[in-house]
Amino acid sequence: MKINLIICLFFTAFLHAQILPERDRALLRDEILEDRFNNLLPQLMDKTGIDMWLIISREYNEDPVMRTMLPSTWLNARRRTILLFYRNKEKNTIEKLAVARYNVGNNIQSAWNKEVQPDQWLALVKIIQEKNPKKIGINTSTHFNIADGLVKTDYDELISVLPKSYQDKIVSAEKLSIAWIETRTQKEMELYRTLVTITHDIIAEAFSNKVIQPGITTSDDVVWWMRQKVTDLGLETWFHPTVDIQRKEEPLKSHIESFSKGEKSDVIMTGDLLHCDFGITYIGLNTDCQQHAYVPKKGETSVPAFLEMAFKKGNRVQDIFTGNFVQGETGNNILRQSIDQAKNEGLRPSIYSHPLGTYGHSAGTTFGMWDAQDGVPVNGDYPLQYNTVYAIELNTTVNIPEWGKDIRIMLEEDGFFGETGFRYVNGRQESIRMVN
């Protein structure tokens, strides 16, 4: 008991040491945002050929892109907030303006004097006419939800005041929105390692005998312990965690049962193979991890070799998949190539990885879904880009003669793809944890 208490105190102290107080979080968030506005945004606007970007939202109905642009002290937009970014490539300048009553933090300056021009829309039109852009990007998209943040009311009001000559310059900012959401900077990746470390540490503590007492603790108890732990650390979860059980005496669940977030609670017993799905939100970024643990029977000092061998097959599917990452290749092609390669090696894979970053299910290419292993039209045809983070989410089904049944090794780890290739943000699970 004394050793367990020491371990518990160590875990808690280590986690708290990695988490910044609120004021320091705000400073870091704003520092990252300033870097993105000044250094990343001009590159993305040049790449997508949009020299003016309009993002329009009203309070509590924010465009998903605008949410990622608000400063740390703004939890929501105010009144109607109109952001205007103007890129002059020849002069190498980027103007960041708000057609609003307030500056939007330190990065975006208010460009509307209501006492001079009472009509906010006409104030916007005046700026557009002064800048005379070649293309005006607005956030509309048929297939990418995060890039479709301009609501009908704001669109209609914009069009009603905009001269016809400028209406003809309006284009979808879909590619620019996706690029803004999916691209990670060096400053963000320095933070991301901390996020994933915290996530792994919480899982390690949850899958320990500090939390789990076989024959007493239920899978739902562990789920709520994780939720409470996140709250106690001053963090948030972006989805409700799950903990599920595979055991010798019970048949393998179907895919639809496995991917249901309404897992039934069950008492954890010795000999169980546990699995969790868990992620946190911290300073504007998200994690998403799935790991396994084994509850030893009396006298067992290690995970059974047949389970470890099954786990290695899950790692092999990961290696095949991430080994096929190529900049500019579509998610559908990478998926197809990886599935075929894994099957040729005698594996039974299922791949359903997704972009990760400022949102949990973020913008970028899609590598299949659990019920779409032949690919995803349009979203899966989007090309893989450098400086992006993905939740490497997949499983492989393995027959276990010792249990007389199949099991499913379900893995998810956060990985970064850059010009030097793919790497896990903070490593990956390479063996099954022991609950001890």
Image: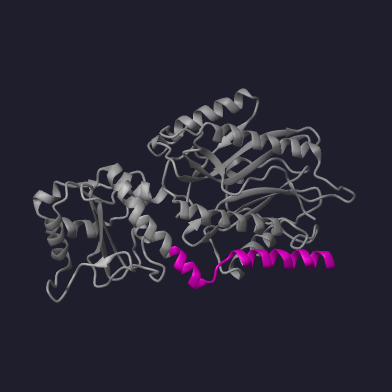
Q: In the image, is 61 to the left or to the right of 408? A: left
**Seen from this angle, which residue lies furthest top?**
344
Q: Residue furthest front?
A: 91
Is residue 305 a member of the stretch shown in magenta? no
Q: Dividing the picture into quarters, in which one does residue 405 lie?
A: top right
Residue 235 lies, in percent from the top left, at 55, 66
Furthest residue to the bottom?
115
The C terminus, quarter of image: bottom right
- State the residue at coordinates (49%, 67%): 25
User: Left or right: 78 with respect to 385?
Assistant: left
Of residues 253 and 99, the one nearer the viewer is 99
Residue 371 versus residue 145 in the image, above or below? above
Residue drawn 57% across and 52% down?
261
User: Is 198 left, or right, of 357 in this rendering?
Assistant: right
Can residue 92 be seen by looking at this rendering? yes
Q: Main secondary structure of the magenta part?
A: helix
Can you give x and y, in whole percent of width and height, for residue 222 in the image?
68, 60
Image location (x, y in percent) of residue 346: 65, 25
Question: x, y percentage for residue 102?
Answer: 27, 72
Colouring scheme, one of rainbow, by chain, secondary structure, one colour: one colour
Residue displayed at 40% across by 39% down: 379
Quadrant for the N terminus, please: bottom right
Q: Residue at x 61, y 55 (%)?
A: 197
For the question of whether residue 68 can be seen, the reply is no
Q: Is residue 89 above or below residue 282?
A: above
Give the residues in magenta.
1-29
The number of callouts visible is 0
Q: Nearer the viewer, residue 231 or 2?
A: 2
